[in-house]
Amino acid sequence: MKKSYKLENLDCAVCAQKIENKVKKLDGIEDVNVSFMLSKMTVDYKDNVDVEEKYAQILKVCKKVEPDCVVKG
């Protein structure tokens, strides 16, 4: 299952790359792409994954890397 999220207040491409790398390491994530230019994150979840639980983990990753970042989706 693929979902896209809008990233607001993402300040730099380095932070976008850090977020992408950390989210890729989460269990239940097949693939992720963070575009700094589009302020967008696309997440491909593995089958039978609790998307809400993973979304909460993604929020924590984003806040740790970029405290002002807001994830909407």
Image (tube, helix red, strand yellow):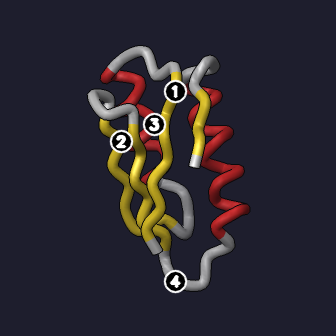
**What residue would you read off at disc 3?**
19
**What residue would you read off at disc 4?**
47
State how far apart marks 3 and 1 are (Cα).
13 Å
**Judging from the image, what secondary structure is the residue with disc 1 in?**
strand
**Judging from the image, what secondary structure is the residue with disc 4 in?**
loop
- Answer yes or no: do the residues labelled 3 and 2 have beta carbons within 8 Å? yes
Badge nearest the viewer, 4 or 1: 1
Could you tell whether 42 is left or right of 35 in the image?
right
Q: Quadrant of residue 4?
A: bottom left
State how far apart marks 4 and 2 are (Cα).
21 Å
The disc, 4 or 2, on the residue closer to the chain's N-terminal end is: 2
**What residue would you read off at disc 1?**
8
Amino acid at the residue labelled 2 = Val
- Residue 55 spot, x, y in % from top left: 64, 54
Amino acid at the residue labelled 1 = Glu
State how far apart marks 4 and 1 are (Cα).
28 Å
**What residue would you read off at disc 2?**
34
